[in-house]
Image (spheres, grey):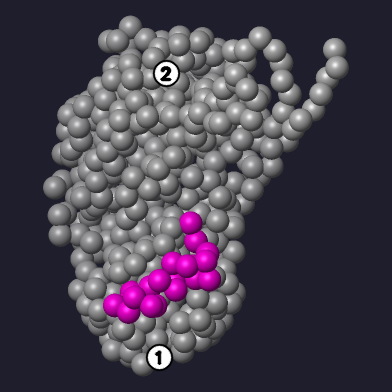
């Protein structure tokens, strides 16, 4: 597909040609005199469009609208809130192909990954609809006669969501749609590398709220981190900040939020490892590791960064893996045969080159790739060759996360040794083991095994389903989003005691002689 033709199709189809405002507070902010950020396509370096940025006065309008909207939205019964979210899911489905193509154009995901991300947002909407009738609290046995003890959950208020470029729609949906059925409103500050996707998704969501006669539930505040980002993080009117991004920025946000007694969900760095034992299904393991390392050009927080292979099968496994790498198509993500598309921008190219250089300086041996790639028909694109680097030890650069398709391979001798190496990094997001031996897999998922928030058996570190809570430990942040009972992060727990008797008996046998 021709980039320019797809661009026109997408921009026309999503109504982006007549909207370049990056702030929505019930109306789209006027753009005259506002600073803009250009959205640059990583396929060919061409500008897709520009989005006007908000300043402090625009942020205040957003927050004022959010505060007013919360009073209305939180009073609506949760199942009705779920019906509104169901309509949003239906609108996303109608626009799935166009939105998927927009993600491909803006951040470089392949077509299947772009549309897959929108499907993830649709799936979250469907999950949230069911959840809207399951916001359960416990009834607890009271030790006092004629008393009932119970707990219930109330919405927090305005949720701040700060997203990264690599999942420009899905992570918003994880937060905003689940927060919505709980009764919250959301202020979204998207990555500056994926502003058009944020505008398009916000436009679709708010068309639904408008036709239902509702105030703005899903507010948008595009702007710099130094202005809008800092205002959002330090705003006492925002009881919860959900941030996806680097560990360094996440640490700062966590500290700032805690200082004002706010809560935070932090989805930060990953340095994900796959362990391939001597009992692995070799073909399955090769495919799982290759997908984990190369999907989204290695720009997932769950991307496979390290693989530990038992010494007895190491040479055979590496040979098969190199063969797969040598055959993948690197090029325009608009080509359905492409496996590895571009990195998000030129800065990512620089990070890739710097990491490869450091790995070589620290004793790494390049087994495949290691260079910038000139993709056919994609002049000025941001392409690199997926890279395999053999390391003797896990230290230095191997302990760091680089958002690029770089895979470090190492040998191990015993599973206990592999787990020790696996866990000896600062991050703790996703992990995998490939083995047909139940003793090995059960050990890996036990408390003595992987220390990550996500553990996979005979499947990739990447590709988590929405039904399970997503998040990690250690410097990954410890937050949880998406499925399971992650909805509780967006609510405040309230313990209620009801006395329906004629006296006031006290707990713990305390007597008050009055």
Residue 295 figure quarter: bottom left
> Can residue 89 be seen in this snapshot?
yes
Q: Residue at x 30, y 69 (%)?
A: 458
Locate the C terminus by quadrant: top right
Residue 361 numbered tag: none
Residue 217 numbered tag: 2
Q: Is residue 212 left or right of residue 58?
A: left
> In front: 37, or 177?
177
Earlier along the polypeptide chain: callout 2 or callout 1?
A: 2
Q: Residues within 10 Å of mark 1 (few under 14, many from 20)?
A: some
Q: CA distance from mark 2 to mark 1?
A: 55 Å
> What element does badge 1 sit on?
loop
> In front: 219, or 438?
438
What range is drawn magenta here?
Answer: 434-453
Query: What x and y, as percent, mark residue 264?
Result: 59, 38
Does the stretch in magenta take in 448?
A: yes
> Can residue 198 be seen in this snapshot?
no
> In front: 505, or 305?
505
State the residue lying farthest toward the right: 513
Q: Residue at x 56, y 31 (%)?
A: 141
Does the stretch in magenta take in 115?
A: no
Is the residue 479 above or below the residue 48 in the image?
A: below
Is the residue 172 above or below the residue 113 in the image?
A: above
> What element does badge 2 sit on?
loop
Q: Residue at x 47, y 87 (%)?
A: 414
Q: Are marks 2 and 1 in contact (CB under 8 Å)?
A: no
Q: Is residue 10 left or right of residue 392?
A: left
Is the residue 370 above or below the residue 271 in the image?
A: below
Residue 311 numbered tag: 1
Q: Residue at x 30, y 10 (%)?
A: 212
Query: What x and y, as percent, mark residue 348?
Result: 45, 57
Residue 157 figure quarter: top right
């Amino acid at each position: 597909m021709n980039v320019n033709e797809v661009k026109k199709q997408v921009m026309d189809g999503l109504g982006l040609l007549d909207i370049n405002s990056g702030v929505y507070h019930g109306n789209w902010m006027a753009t005259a005199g506002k600073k803009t950020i250009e959205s640059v396509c990583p396929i060919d370096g061409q500008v897709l469009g520009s989005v006007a940025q908000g300043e402090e006065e625009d942020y205040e309008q957003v927050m004022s609208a959010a505060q007013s909207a919360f009073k209305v939205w939180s009073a609506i019964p949760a199942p009705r809130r779920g019906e509104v979210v169901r309509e949003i899911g239906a609108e996303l489905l109608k626009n799935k192909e166009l939105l998927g193509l927009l993600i491909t154009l803006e951040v470089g995901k392949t077509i299947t990954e772009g549309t897959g991300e929108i499907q993830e947002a649709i799936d979250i909407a469907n999950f949230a609809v069911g959840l809207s009738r399951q916001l359960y609290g416990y009834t607890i046995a009271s030790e006092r006669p004629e008393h009932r003890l119970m707990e219930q959950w109330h919405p927090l208020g305005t949720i701040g969501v700060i997203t990264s470029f690599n999942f420009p729609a899905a992570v918003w949906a994880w937060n905003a749609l689940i927060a919505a059925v709980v009764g919250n409103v959301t202020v979204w500050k998207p990555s500056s590398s994926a502003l058009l996707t944020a505008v398009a998704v916000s436009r679709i969501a708010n068309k639904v709220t408008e036709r239902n006669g509702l105030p703005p539930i899903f507010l948008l505040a595009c702007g710099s981190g130094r202005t809008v980002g800092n205002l959002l993080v330090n705003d006492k009117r925002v009881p919860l900040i959900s941030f996806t991004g680097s560990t360094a920025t996440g640490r700062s946000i966590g500290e700032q939020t805690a200082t004002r007694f706010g809560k935070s969900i932090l989805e930060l760095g990953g340095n994900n490892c796959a362990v391939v034992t001597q009992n692995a299904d070799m073909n399955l393991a090769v495919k799982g590791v290759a997908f984990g390392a190369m999907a989204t050009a290695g720009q997932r927080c769950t991307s496979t960064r390290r693989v530990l292979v038992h010494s007895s099968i190491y040479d055979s496994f590496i040979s098969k893996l190199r063969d797969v790498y040598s055959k993948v198509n690197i090029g325009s993500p608009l080509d359905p045969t492409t496996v590895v598309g571009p990195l998000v921008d030129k800065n990512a190219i620089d990070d890739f080159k710097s990491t490869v250089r450091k790995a070589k300086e620290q004793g790494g041996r390049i087994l495949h790739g290691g260079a910038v790639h000139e993709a056919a028909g994609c002049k000025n694109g941001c392409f690199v060759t997926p890279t395999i680097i053999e390391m003797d030890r896990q230290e230095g650069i191997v302990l760091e996360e680089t958002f690029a398709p770089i895979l470090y391979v190492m040998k191990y001798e015993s599973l206990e040794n592999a787990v020790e190496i696996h866990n000896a990094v600062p991050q703790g997001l996703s992990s995998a083991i490939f083995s047909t031996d139940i003793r090995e897999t059960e050990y890996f998922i036990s408390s003595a095994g992987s220390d990550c928030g996500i553990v996979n058996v005979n499947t990739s570190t990447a590709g988590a389903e929405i039904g399970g809570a997503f998040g990690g430990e250690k410097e990954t942040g410890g937050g949880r989003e998406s499925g399971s009972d992650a909805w509780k992060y967006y609510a405040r727990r309230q313990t209620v005691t009801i006395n329906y008797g004629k006296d006031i008996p006290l707990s713990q046998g305390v007597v008050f002689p009055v």
